[in-house]
Image (cartoon, grey):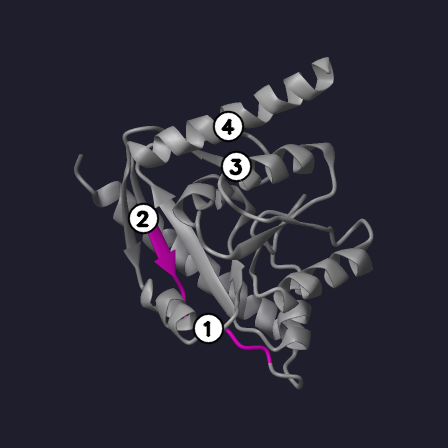
Amino acid sequence: MWRALKFAFVTRLPWLYIYFVGKTSAIASINAKYQTDFEAAQQLYINALWHERQAAFAYTHRGLKISPLVSPSKDGDIMTRVLQLFGFTATRGSSRREPRKGLMSLMRRIKEGYCLAITPDGPVGPRREVKQGTLYLAQKLRLPILPVTNGMKRKLVFKSWDRFQLPLPFNYIVLVYGAPIWIKPEDDLEQKAAELKKALDEITEQADRAACQQKM
């Protein structure tokens, strides 16, 4: 019982914090039409974002039928519960641990009508290096990859491998979407990985610049 209570506390705390940050922050978006067009057309897609930008994503994308990919680790257990509190249905899987099982779980989510959210440089890096698993999945499922990122005027940057960013309350948060990337059967995944990295780096720089320029 004590373990269950401890787990509940550990998961409620970050949920309450991120929720408070979101409620006290102004949130703007750039190129959101890429996502809204997909939603209007009922086109499923894969959100791709850098691992370091996950925290704000949990709030800004709550309520959408998106299933984030979460590693099958103890930290992943906590993240899964936090995401559930925001209304997400997470998919557990990893490119390192039981990748086939993770792939099957993602395919099941697609059949259930969920879009996906994947950090192509997670769960352990290298930072901002796209692994081909996301591209392989998009190619096999014939789904577009929708690059997305966020920039925050006020944040804490941790000394972790990904330089994880934690938004602070009373903030200004900017979401930026990149043009969708389709992976054809004949496409070279290494080239597409470079294309996705370039897109994510560019919109991340754009989001940071837009957030920092905002006067508060």
Q: Amino acid at mark 3?
A: Leu
Instruction: Determine which of the numbered discs, if any, sits on residue 174 in the image.
Output: 2
Q: Which residue is mark 1?
A: 42
As rendered, which of 145 and 207 lies closer to the eye?
Answer: 145
Q: Assess disc 4: are there few (<14), some (14-19) or many (≥20) residues with their C-alpha within 10 Å of its C-alpha.
A: some
- Between the residue at mark 1 and the residue at mark 2, the CA separation in whole angstroms equals 25 Å
Rendering coords of residue 115 (x, y %)? 54, 62
Q: Report the side of 164 relative to 190 (left or right).
A: left
Q: Residue at x 20, y 42 (%)?
A: 214
Instruction: Determine which of the numbered discs, if any, sits on residue 85 in the image.
Output: 3
Q: Which residue is mark 4?
A: 14
- Between the residue at mark 1 and the residue at mark 3, the CA separation in whole angstroms equals 25 Å
122 within the magenta span: no
- Between the residue at mark 4 and the residue at mark 1, the CA separation in whole angstroms equals 32 Å
Q: Assess disc 1: are there few (<14), some (14-19) or many (≥20) residues with their C-alpha within 10 Å of its C-alpha.
A: few
Under circle 2, the secondary element is strand
Rendering coords of residue 111 (x, y %)? 64, 68
Under circle 1, the secondary element is loop
Instruction: Nearest to the eye among marks 3 and 2: give it.
Output: 3
Rendering coords of residue 132 (x, y %)? 67, 64
Q: Is residue 169 above or below residue 1?
A: below
Tell me how many marks there are: 4
